[in-house]
Amino acid sequence: MTLFQALFPRRTSRREDEMAYLNQAVSRYDLEQREREVEHGKFARF
């Protein structure tokens, strides 16, 4: 089972991806820019 989990890791949710991206911001300006990108669908999955 461990090998299977290592080969096929759990897929993260859209919300988790967005939060991880926002948490990488290095300044307030960077955070605001990233928030706009998320609002405009950067993580929208088709």
Image (cartoon, rainbow, N blue to C red):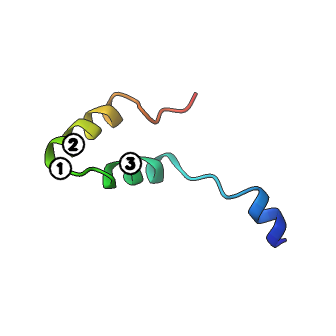
* Above or below: residue 41 compared with residue 11: above
Q: Please state the horizontal and vertical placement of residue 27, each as a whole percent of the image.
A: 17, 50
Left or right: residue 30 compared with residue 12: left
Q: Residue furthest left?
A: 28
Where, by quadrant of the figure, is residue 4 drawn? bottom right
Secondary structure found at label 3: helix
Residue picked out by circle 2: 30
Tag 1: residue type?
Answer: Ser
How far separated are the C-alphas under marks 1 and 3?
13 Å
Q: Residue furthest bottom?
A: 2
Residue picked out by circle 3: 21
Tag 2: residue type?
Answer: Asp
Label whose residue precedes the other's in the sequence (3 or 2): 3
Residue picked out by circle 1: 27
Front position among marks 1 and 3 = 1
Q: Quadrant of the N terminus?
A: bottom right
- Residue located 76% across and 64% down the image: 5
Q: Quadrant of the C terminus?
A: top right
Tag 3: residue type?
Answer: Tyr
How many residues crowd mark 3 within 10 Å: few (<14), some (14–19), many (20+)?
A: some
- Residue located 26% across and 33% down the image: 36
* Above or below: residue 23 compared with residue 38: below
